[in-house]
Amino acid sequence: MVDGVGGPGEVRRIEGIQNPFVEKSKGKERKEKEDQVEIKHASLVSDLIEEAKKIPSVREELVEDLRKAIESGNYFVDVEKLARKLLEELSE
């Protein structure tokens, strides 16, 4: 045995501790506080959100131009450029 340690069965109570369990303070009620968030520039944030909603997720004009070019047979793919881009992406 290690000097001063009698083993797992010999655990002594620490003096001054009456009850090892934590108790709520008696007679004092703790007032719960709610979390609060303050946004100083709320109107600016709101305006930016509204502007972002107006931006289309798809560039409709570009899509329409491409659709017309494909339908009329005027859209050609540069296969060498496409192959280079694919190889670049695969090599990363």
Image (tube, helix red, strand yellow):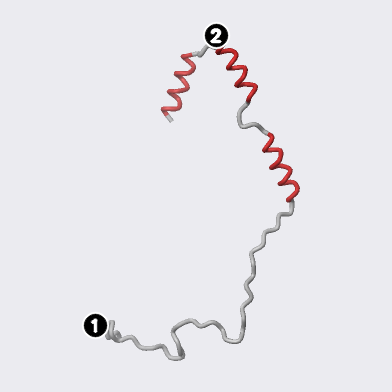
For residue 74, side relative to residue 12 (left or right):
right
Q: Residue furthest right?
A: 43
Q: Which mark is residue 73?
A: 2
Q: Is residue 35 above or below residue 49?
A: below
Among the 4 quarters of the image, the one containing residue 14: bottom left
Among the 4 quarters of the image, the one containing residue 72: top right
Crowd tier of the residue under label 1, counting other residues whose Cα lies within 10 Å: few below 14, some 14–19, many 20 or above? few
Q: Which mark is residue 1?
A: 1
Q: Which mark is residue 65?
A: none
For residue 68, side relative to residue 89 (left or right):
right
Residue at x-position 63% and y-position 26%: 59
**Comes first in the chain, label 2 or label 1:** 1
Is the N terminus in the top left, top right, bottom left or bottom right quadrant?
A: bottom left
Crowd tier of the residue under label 2, counting other residues whose Cα lies within 10 Å: few below 14, some 14–19, many 20 or above? few
The amino acid sitting under disc 1 is Met
Q: Nearer the viewer, residue 38 or 27?
A: 27
Q: Secondary structure at mark 1?
A: loop
Is the C terminus in the top left, top right, bottom left or bottom right quadrant?
A: top left
The amino acid sitting under disc 2 is Gly
